[in-house]
Image (cartoon, rainbow, N blue to C red):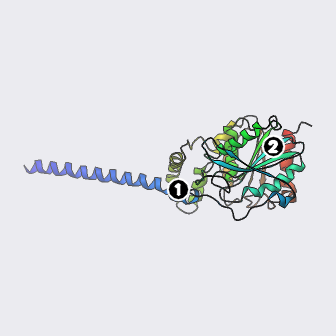
Amino acid sequence: MNQKNNILKRRKAKKIILWLLLGLFIFAIGFLLAMPLLVMNPMTNKHIDFKKVWSAQDYGMEAEHFFVKTEDGLSISAWEIEAKNPKVIIICISGIHNPSVTAFFGHASLFREHNCTTILFDMRAHGQSEGDRICLGYKEYLDTRAIVQYIKSKPAYKELPIVVFGLSMGGVTAINSIGEIPEIDGLISLSAYSSWEDVFYEQMADQTPVYFAKIVKPFVSIVASVKYGTNAWVTRPKSEIRKLRTRPALLMHSKEDSQVPFSNFERIMLHAPDHVDTFVREGDHHFISESFIKPEMDTAYADKLLSFLMNNFYNE
């Protein structure tokens, strides 16, 4: 009898241990899934209303303000600055929280002088565009697609090449856009991250033990896939850049970028076609140019942009 009782006690103890281990495993998985959300939600579950905006009039230009509708039903705010005899149309996109895309009016002025029409648009959940959730580049290519459809609907623009030009998360959106939208003919990307999980991991590894950041990293992609209803392993710059094929591209980054480490640029280039052009700056210059709102003041930066456009999209 005692032997039977001992066997039953051992079995009961094993069950308790198994349930405890299962509970600990579920708790650990829940904790690892919660970690990305604790970081992402305060950053992304919001609408950005910019305190500082620029106007076309600041640069002696006129701009037409208009709205387009995305396929998932959001109204996107945009500005069009026309050139007299355009050779190319450039779509400009800004970053996750700043600056307003109106900071690109200086670029639009420069481009207009060189026969480029420019369209600036506020991504979803930014400025006058609708939306209350920033999607980290996973969904914003839908905003770009609505702008491309607008361009293609205008007879005067129908045959002109389209170049998408983005900064930071706008650079991510630009790369994802050219990967997903075949009507786009060229790409300029500044300071883009290679994937959200990559930059999340790098920032986390600076503040916590590296081994812990490595454990959390795969859960970032799982959370992003569920949160945004997408495949986070596919809709990311280091994957989308492969779809560039022969289309021209210019990627820019600074070596000491404190917001998006240079390793992101290196990972994107590792997957990019061989013909992709680059511009690398020493120091910490997330906006690449120290004269971003007046790009003509930075001759090396301005010359690189213009030479890329002229070499690839001017038929003269």
Would residue 194 be visible to someone looking at this image?
Answer: no
Q: Is residue 256 above or below residue 274?
A: below
Observer-nearest of 128 and 191:
128
**Residue 67: x, y in percent?**
71, 48
Q: What whole-number distance in Å separates the C-alpha atoms at marks 1 and 2? A: 42 Å
Hey, what amino acid is under mark 1? Answer: Ala
Q: Where is residue 95 in the image (x, y as percent from the top left)?
A: 68, 55
Q: Residues within 10 Å of mark 2 (few under 14, many from 20)?
A: many
What label does residue 213 carry, if any?
1
The residue at 83%/41% (across/down) is 88
- According to the picture, the residue beneath numbered tag 2 turns out to be 89
Mark 1 secondary-structure assignment? helix
Q: Is residue 126 visible?
A: yes
Q: Are marks 1 and 2 in contact (CB under 8 Å)?
A: no
Q: Which amino acid does label 2 sit on?
A: Ile
Identify which residue, 295 or 286, lies in the foreground: 295
